[in-house]
Amino acid sequence: MTPNRLVALLRICALCSAVCLTILFLGPFTYLVDVFHVTDKEAHALAFFGVTLGLFAIAPRWRRTDLALAALAFGVLIELAQGLTGRGVSLTDLMADGVGILAALVPGIVERLRHHLRTSPDIDFASIRARDRRSRTAPVPASLIQPETPAAVRAR
């Protein structure tokens, strides 16, 4: 098995999981919280911790923060849909979703900070961001940069 095949398999699992989570959050399954001995908020946090980690696994080329925002958007949509299905819209459920998302996001942020401390401890974060190849702004391709001519150098 190659990493690409593993990611493809994980994407299929993620799609099935998303459908199951949507059904669980929108259906009349509030008794499941009692079966698993967790509170509703713990269930939300655990579910969105899993959703976020799943997104990290199936979209390795996306930024973690963008994936976390996508997970949060999914949480907002779930809460709005719960309001349409007769269940209550709860801001505290959404905050629990956010706690689960943060719990998945923070270790990656800490590891990135550790990387910067190991590789460039004396450079400020603005400089690190400027040379980051993953920057949102596209770098200027080398083919578009005009080399300086000797006349331009003498003119300075």
Image (spheres, rainbow, N blue to C red):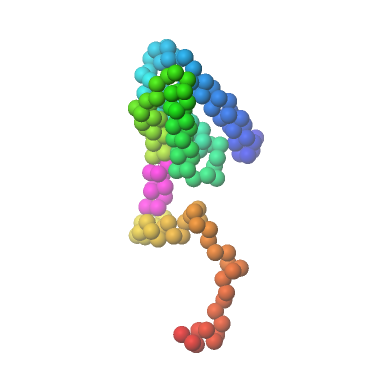
- Residue found at x 42% / y 19%: 87
Name the foreground residue: 76 vs 148: 76
Specify whether 124 is left or right of 63: left
Q: Is residue 112 magenta?
A: yes
Q: Quadrant of residue 130?
A: bottom left
Specify whether 35 is left or right of 142: left
Residue 86, percent across and down?
A: 44, 18
Name the foreground residue: 24 vs 91: 91
In the depicted structure, whether residue 89 falls above or below residue 65: above
Position of the N terminus by quadrant: top right
In the depicted structure, whether residue 102 falls above or below residue 147: above
- Residue found at x 56% / y 71%: 145
Q: Quadrant of residue 12?
A: top right
Name the foreground residue: 38 vs 112: 38
Residue 16, percent across and down?
A: 58, 25
Name the foreground residue: 13 vs 71: 71
Q: Main secondary structure of the magenta part?
A: helix
Magenta stretch: give its range: 107-117
In the depicted structure, whether residue 88 falls above or below residue 106: above
- Whether residue 64 appears in this view of the structure is no
Specify whether 122 is left or right of 84: left
- Residue found at x 55% / y 45%: 61
- Residue found at x 47% / y 14%: 28
